[in-house]
Amino acid sequence: MPEETYNIQLDADQVNTALLNVHGADTEPTAASTKMVQSGGLHAYLEGERQNSGYGVYDDLTTTEVSPLLAANARVQLTIDGDGPATYIEQIPGGEFVLWDDVGNFIQPANDGDAYMMRVSFRYKSNALNSHFDLELDISPTGDGSNVILLDTIQCLKAANTEARYNQSHFIYTRSTFIANGGRLFINSTDAGDTISIYEQTLVIGRIHKAI
């Protein structure tokens, strides 16, 4: 019988299902078993696919409405300590020790050519009506603003000192500069010159492509 080749595309959930439904080397299938017999090559491939993707949730505990991060006509680094109750890092990609460095407060990608989706969330207030400020992702060595690769201008449409929420997702990819320096997030209110209060910030970041 001629050998047949199959090319089956699996998403992340299907990969996990397949891995859970195989017999390990130390188990023996029975007549009533519905699990596949483990193939060394197939199992290794599926494990590799599972490690390519993953995500982490980093929630801040330090800032609050009464003690926010302040950008008073200033450019201030966004800090997320990872100590908040929503922090969840059990699904970080295999081989990854950190996606967000909660000491230096920067994104730390793994490989030149990786692709990530990140969702930045926080609550904010402006001390002025019809103000605005920028969220920046800076990959310069010191975060001095010389290499901003993402800039999102946020309009403050509510009355002064009224809470609003920011919750946006962004696609990012990494090259050698990003790998070397990491990526720092900044709140920049210098254009309008107003004071922006930031609190309850959370970063969700997931790798959607591992460099080939």
Image: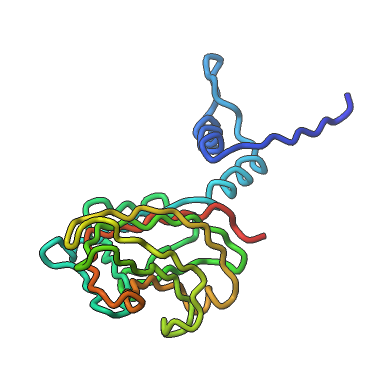
Whether residue 21 sits left or right of residue 70 in the image: it is right
Q: Residue at x 52, y 57 (%)?
A: 171
- Residue 92 placed where, x, y %? 43, 54
Q: Residue at x 25, y 54 (%)?
A: 164
Colouring used for the render: rainbow
Report if residue 98 is visible in the image. Answer: no
Report if residue 104 is visible in the image. Answer: yes
- In the foreground, 6 or 120: 120
On-image quarter of the C terminus: bottom right
Whether residue 150 sits left or right of residue 168 in the image: it is right
Q: Residue furthest front?
A: 130
Q: Residue furthest right?
A: 2
130 shown above or below 15: below
- In the foreground, 22 or 133: 133
Q: Residue at x 54, y 40 (%)?
A: 12
172 shown above or below 186: above
- Residue 36 placed where, x, y %? 59, 27
Report the number of discs. 0
Whether residue 205 sits left or right of residue 63 in the image: it is right
Query: Picture quarter containing residue 56?
Result: bottom left
62 shown above or below 4: below
Q: Residue furthest top?
A: 32
Whether residue 62 sits left or right of residue 209 in the image: it is left
- Residue 54 placed where, x, y %? 47, 51
On-image quarter of the N terminus: top right
- In the foreground, 194 or 130: 130
